[in-house]
Image (cartoon, helix red, strand yellow):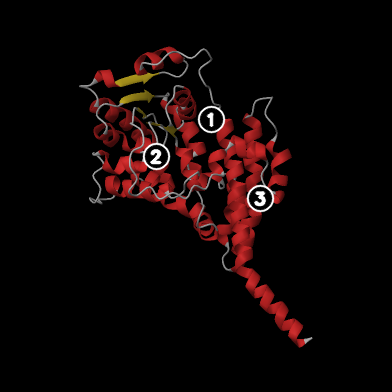
Amino acid sequence: MIIAGEFWLTGREARVSKVRKQGGKDSACILLRASFGVLVDLADRYNANRSSYQPNIRDMSFSEFVFGFSDETKRKFPYLFANLDIDRHGSKRQMPMEVLSLGMSRTGTASMKAALTRLGYNTAHGFDMHANKRDCLMWDEAFAAKYHGDTFIDLNKPDFWDQLLGHVSAVTDMPHNAFGPELINAYPEVKVVLVERKIEAWYKSFERAVIRGADFPKAITLFSYLDPMGVGFFKVIQREGFMAGQFHAKDVAEWRANARPVYQQHYAEIRRVLKDQPDRLLEYKLGDGWEPLCQFLGKVVPDEPFPRVNETSSHDEMQFVTAMICLRAALRNIAMCIAPFVVAVLAWKYSRA
């Protein structure tokens, strides 16, 4: 997860630093040129981590940027192209909530989503916000209630969660893991799965995939104006939700400083909340396979290997595709803004001819 700025601003600082040094009409042009450099960085980073059988996305995706995305890309990342546009306020629960996988992001959450889905659970993951960007608005309400003093919503009761998560029976990844105790209290019969990595391995992955995306706040702000229905939806969640809320940070430097302590506090808090209900908690270790998970959930062990999603490679490729989507949207919106002026100028020149 994710999340907005990380998808298109995780390239080398040299590619984007010029934007912060210049203003006025040059900034947008510089940012657009820098964005193409960022696409190259994302492609290089993905290709360095891809398996030998995976395609080189620099070879295939720039044509998609110009001519539109292929069916293969849309099948691989369906949530990036769904555009459901559903306002879940007032929605009712459609299926019972059964599993809360509350490990922090970058602890195998994509593999856990695949495993829970294979076991029959309709599972929500952080990436799903791309499919329905309006969910960001409700997540913003949840972050405000827990971390910013808004008392309008009681997150320890199921009413709010049944609206936002009523269409799923399991959750994993951020932003769900930012509300572990509240979800546990709201659904007192639900099973909880906790996956933990060694802290330094986790931090290296999390810093690279998530925190770096917030390194360029001015560029993020500019893109949120250029693509308000894309980046604009995620900007507040990234800064007010994850950075200022879950990680108690006022800026990116403090986010990095707070990451390890918050990680440790998260796991300690989940264990504390469930200390008198040990039967509800499974401490799952990556690599343990199907047996402990299926035994805990009362499911038959599938006759297939446990899913193993290469989160680094998959995440980097998704970042690249999302960067292209954001840049295409920004260019389209710029064109729509300047088109009337271009037409007016041409008409004026034609009338004087």
Identify the image quadrant of the C terminus.
bottom right
Q: Residue furthest left?
A: 276
Identify the residue position indicated by label 2 in the image.
Answer: 175
Say what amino acid the circle numbered 2 marks. Pro
Q: Residue at x 59, y 61 (%)?
A: 333
The answer to whether marks 3 and 1 mark residues whose Cβ atoms lie closer than 8 Å is no
Q: Is residue 31 left or right of residue 89?
A: right
Disc 3 crowd, CA 10 A, few/some/many (<14, 14-19, 20+) = some
Say what amino acid the circle numbered 1 marks. Glu
Could you say where residue 52 lies in the image, as x and y percent from the top left?
Answer: 69, 24
Identify the residue position indicated by label 3 in the image.
Answer: 36
Residue 178, compared with residue 88, is above or below; it is above
Residue 85, compared with residue 346, is above or below; it is above
Considering only order in the chain, which callout, 1 or 2, is on the residue closer to the N terminus? Answer: 2
Cα–Cα gap, marks 2 and 1? 17 Å
Query: Judging from the image, what secondary structure is the residue with disc 1 in?
Result: helix
Q: Quick one: 58 or 18, which is closer to the camera?
A: 58
Cα–Cα gap, marks 2 and 3? 29 Å
Cα–Cα gap, marks 3 and 1? 24 Å
Query: Judging from the image, what secondary structure is the residue with disc 3 in?
Result: helix
Residue 311 marker: 1
Q: Is residue 289 left or right of residue 16?
A: left
Could you say where residue 55 lies in the image, as x and y percent from the top left?
Answer: 69, 32
Query: Judging from the image, what secondary structure is the residue with disc 2 in?
Result: loop
Q: Quick one: 250 or 229, which is closer to the camera?
A: 229
Disc 1 crowd, CA 10 A, few/some/many (<14, 14-19, 20+) = some
Say what amino acid the circle numbered 3 marks. Phe
The answer to whether marks 2 and 3 mark residues whose Cβ atoms lie closer than 8 Å is no
The answer to whether residue 220 of the structure is visible from this angle is: yes
